[in-house]
Image: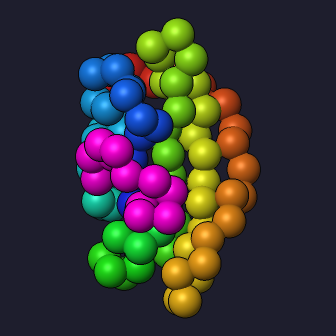
Amino acid sequence: MAMFTTSRYASAETRRMAMALARDQGSVYVARGKRTVVQLASLARRLGEDIIHVIEEKAGKPHLLATISVSANGAWKWEGKPEILEKKI
């Protein structure tokens, strides 16, 4: 399964998109706050998730969907950052 979050200091629109994507896919949304990627990976493992999707923004709008894979031992790596096509929330 996957976990959704946003980049730090995300706009309300970006947070809404992350929540909507998580809900649509039956996944969990986690508020980012001041968590580092290492902290997010640790939380993902505790929740049993092996993928983290991070919604990044540009000019206050959702722009990229960064994917981080998390291994069973807690190691993580960036998988890619495709652009987000516009989606009505």
- Observer-nearest residue: 57 or 9? 9
Residue 29, position as x, y percentages in the image: 29, 52
Residue lying furthest top = 59
Residue 12, position as x, y percentages in the image: 28, 22
Decide if residue 44 is in sight here. Answer: no
Snapshot colouring? rainbow
Residue 8, position as x, y percentages in the image: 42, 35
Q: Magenta residues, as a range?
A: 30-40
Residue at position x 41%, y 73% in the image: 42
Image quarter of residue 48: bottom left
Which image quarter is the N terminus in?
bottom left
Q: Is residue 25 above or below residue 34?
A: below
Q: Is residue 46 above or below residue 58?
A: below
- Please name the predominant secondary structure of the magenta segment in the image: loop
Decide if residue 46 is in sight here. Answer: yes
Q: Is residue 22 above or below residue 17?
A: below
Question: Left or right: where does residue 38 sit relative to residue 78?
Answer: left
**Residue 47 drawn in magenta:** no
Question: Left or right: where does residue 83 sit relative to residue 2?
Answer: right
